Image (spheres, rainbow, N blue to C red):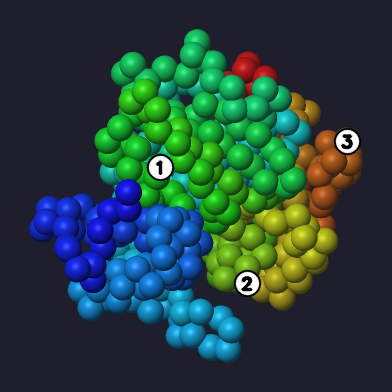
Amino acid sequence: MRTKEPGDKNTDSASGVLRRRTLFLQTMRKKTFDTGYFTTSDIAEEEKLPRSTAQDWINRLLKEGCIFIKEEPHGRSPARYAARSALPQTTCRRIFTTAYNGCVEIFHECMSSGCAGFCEYHHRKAGGAAISVARDGLIFRETARISDAGHQENPAELSLKNAAVGLMSVELKDDEVIQTIRSIYGGAAYSLSSMMGMAKGVCGVNISAENGFVTGTVRTKALLPVTVGIDDTDKKGCGGATFALANALFKYLIESGIAIGIRHQVAALYPGIEEMTAGNSCSFLELAVPKENMDVLAAKICRFVEDESLSENWGVALVTGIFIPEKLETFAADVRRRRVSFEEAAAAAKECGAAVFGKRGIIGALAAAALKNQPQEVLLDCTLPMIKDARLEHL
C-alpha cells in the first residue's frame, strides 16, 4: 500500500511527513552527488511514485530552499534540479593517480593538513594494498601494486581493527585506476561516501555498506608519472637561478593544463666544480601527465627553458616511471661526489631510457631527475649517502 503523500485528502501525521521529506532529500542528494543534477522523472522512478507526486515534493523543497533549479526546461529537455547540501563542500580538493609498470601512485590533495595527516596515519596502520604511505604538505600519497584479483578482500592484508580506513586493492581497467577503499562507520566513511566523489579528478564513486563497514570504489584517470630534471648552469654574475626557472616552469605546466604538478624540489650536486655558481644546485619537477599530452610535453618544456634561461648550456631530462632505475641512481651518486662528463650523462640516459635535451646542463638535469625518491636531507646534503627505495622490497 502506497504511503500517503502531501496533497492526499487524508494526510500523514507530522512525523510521517518529516520521514518522507528526509527520504526524498536523501534521494535528491544522492542523485546530485552521482550526476550533478536530477529531474522529476528521476525522483519518480527512484521512489516508484507518480510523476505528479514527485513534482509536488520538488515544488515543496524548492520553496523551503533545500534544492534549486540548476537548469530551466527548454524544448523537450526537462528542468534539472540540484540539492544545495550536495554542492562541493569537501576537504578533498583533488584525487589523481599515476600508473606505470604494474604499480600506481595515488594522490589525495587535501584542503586541510589535519585531514591529510589523518588519512596518512590510518592508511598506514590498515596495511592492505598500499606498499608505502607518505605525506608532503597537503598531499597524502600512497604506492600500491595493481591487483589481478579484482576487488576480493584479503583479510590478512587489510585490518581495520585499529584503523579507520585503508586501501583494499587497486585495478587498472580501460585507462582508469579503480581503487577499493574500506572504512568503518563514522568520519572516514562519511569522507568516502560524501566527499571523495566531489574531488577534482574523480570519475565516479560507488558505495556499499555491510557489517559495520563502508566499501567504495573510486575511479580516476590513469596518468603517467614523469620527473623533469632541470639545470640552468647559470653564468657568474648573471643573476639567474635554476630553482626560479624550475618553479616558473612548474607554474606554466600546471596553468596550461599540460600536467598536474605534484612537487618541485631542489638538490645539491658536487661542490668542487670551478665554474659553478653558488651551491651548484639543480631542480626536479614531479608531474602527473595525461597520456595525450606526452607527445608535446618535451617540446613545450624545452621551448620554455630555452626562452627563459640566461645560459646557453641549459639542460633538461625527462624520466617516466614511479621508480628510478638503479643505474640512473648510480649516475646521480657519481654527480654528487665528482665531476661527470657530458658523454657519461648521455650514455646513462640512453641506457636507462631517459630523454635529455640541451647542452652541458643535461648532467645536472639527469642527476636531479634520478634523485626524485630521495628524502629531503639527502637532496640538500651531497655528503650523505643515497638511500635505497624501501618500496622495491615489496615488488
| Amino acid type at mark 2 | Ser
Q: Viewed as shown, does residue 170 lie left or right of 113? A: right
User: Measuring 89% from the left and 41% from the top, which residue is drawn there?
Assistant: 350
Residue 291 placement: quadrant: bottom right
Name the one closer to the observer, 310 or 379: 379
Name the one closer to the observer, 151 or 89: 151
Residue 103 vertical placement versus 79 (above, below): above
Tag 3 secondary structure: helix
Q: Viewed as shown, does residue 80 lie left or right of 97? A: left
- Mark 2 vs mark 3, foreground winner is 2
Q: Earlier in the sequence, mark 1 or mark 3?
A: 1
Tag 1 secondary structure: helix
Q: Which residue corresponds to mark 3?
A: 351
Which part of the image, by quadrant, shows the C terminus?
top right
Furthest-top residue in this view:
156
User: Measuring 55% from the left and 51% from the top, which residue is drawn there?
Assistant: 204
**3D distance between C-alphas at marks 1 and 3:** 43 Å
Report whether residue 172 is seen.
Answer: yes
Q: Position of residue 183 (x, y in %)?
A: 38, 31
Q: Position of residue 252 (x, y in %)?
A: 60, 70
Count neighbours of disc 2 (C-alpha within 10 A) and say few if under 14, some if 14 to 19, many if 20 or more.
Answer: few
Q: Viewed as shown, does residue 7 lie left or right of 279? A: left
User: Measuring 46% from the left and 75% from the top, which residue is drawn there?
Assistant: 80
Query: Residue 321 shows which numbered tag?
Result: none
User: Measuring 46% from the left and 52% from the top, which residue is drawn there?
Assistant: 197
Name the one closer to the observer, 351 or 288: 288
**3D distance between C-alphas at marks 2 and 3:** 32 Å
Q: Which residue corresponds to mark 1?
A: 192
Q: Earlier in the sequence, mark 2 or mark 3?
A: 2
**3D distance between C-alphas at marks 2 and 1:** 30 Å
Q: Which residue corresponds to mark 2?
A: 256
